[in-house]
Image (tube, rainbow, N blue to C red):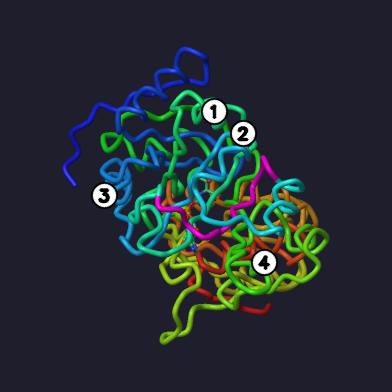
Amino acid sequence: MVITMNTLHLHSTPAEVKQAGELLRAGQLVAIPTETVYGLAANAYDADAVAGIFAAKGRPADNPLIVHIASPDELPPLCSAIPETAGRLIDAFWPGPLTLILPKSDAVPGIVSAGLPTVAVRCPSDETARAIIRAAGVPLAAPSANLSGSPSPTTAARVAADMDGRIAAIVDGGPCRVGVESTVVTLCTEVPRLLRLGGVTLEQLQAVLGEVEMDDAVTQPLKADAVAASPGMKYKHYAPTATVILVKGDAAAFCRYVNAHAADGVEALGFDGETADLQVPFQTYGRREDHQTQAHAVFEELRKADDRHVRTLYVACPDSAGVGLAVYNRLLRSAGFQVVTA
Ligand code: TXA
Ligand code: MG
């Protein structure tokens, strides 16, 4: 893609939110903050504008986008049916980091859902995100605002690193509160099925739905011959340039394992209070039991490792309770499923 645009850097003031809305209405691409990660938005009803998202990100055309709305009232025109389970999930988790897959209405252009008969919809809780959607006056299709395959951006500066010159504007709403993407649940299967873990946890979903199935792809690489329920799962994801290796084990085992692999360009990402014995440069991303902090920090730490030109990053593996499961899932993909037990 030719890089020619002068990308505006806007803030979440009423005047600049209005300006962002006007750009979106006019078919331009604008990166917007949400509580999960920054999104790269376009008018969901404008197929040409949506095509621009795929071009700017280098996103495969068969990977569908999430449509963002400012209020649950804006859902009906986007889908052809709203099952009873959707109502319960919306009451419990919207606005917030939960994406629902529903049967698509004809109002949504096929390019948004990559030709699937379903559509992904989410009502973000971030106030700036919702103000921009209202200012645009249309639902916004938005994937994460990174170049395809890279870690999702959780600050406007990281969006700019990937998107400056490719899009009309970036609205800076500060660092994202959650730090990992939304949880994706499809209601187009007999039993609601979890396609991606994120800001809403498996435990929270089970409390509302009772039965929830978890797609294999949440914790395993997609088998070569399998059809992805969520096309995003078959692509390399969240990967920094550094090689990431996830290390399972307690503090002592982690330090021993990493020290045994010490070399030029080798660094560690460990838990707060568990790095005293490390003999390589290290960062931390929260205490072992503090999954919220880990979620908040994980993508930024992967990008910072690239800033330092780290060759191999050994990461202490989070346990899989609560949001920890979402952090684990992102790190698994960053690591290309390389996990060692120390
Ligand atoms: O938190 C989030 O969800 C962020 C913010 C910006 O809202 N967005 C985001 O979008 O993470 P993206 O495009 O990076 O991830 C969307 C995921 C992909 O794995 C995609 O395959 C899946 O949702 N998806 C979208 N529409 C789908 C559909 N109709 N059926 C199945 N999976 C779908
Ligand atoms: Mg993404």
Q: Disc 3 versus disc 1: distance between alpha carbons?
A: 24 Å
Left or right, 16 with reference to 186: left
Q: Disc 4 versus disc 2: distance between alpha carbons?
A: 29 Å
State which region is magenta. Answer: 94-106
Residue 296 drawn at (x, y percent):
64, 45
Residue 110 drawn at (x, y percent):
34, 56
Residue 22 drawn at (x, y percent):
37, 22
Q: Which mark is residue 10?
A: none
Establish whether ligand 1 lies closer than 8 Å to the Cβ of label 3.
Answer: no
- Tell me which label, 3 or 1, sits earlier in the chain: 3
- Residue flagged by tag 1: what amino acid is it? Gly
Q: Disc 4 versus disc 1: distance between alpha carbons?
A: 30 Å
Label 1 close to label 2 by CB (< 8 Å): yes
Helix, strand or loop for disc 2: loop
- Tell me which label, 2 or 3, sits earlier in the chain: 3
Q: Disc 4 versus disc 3: distance between alpha carbons?
A: 34 Å
Residue designated by label 4: 317
- Tell me which label, 4 or 2, sits earlier in the chain: 2
| Camera-nearest label, 4 or 2 | 2
Left or right, 116 with reference to 246: left
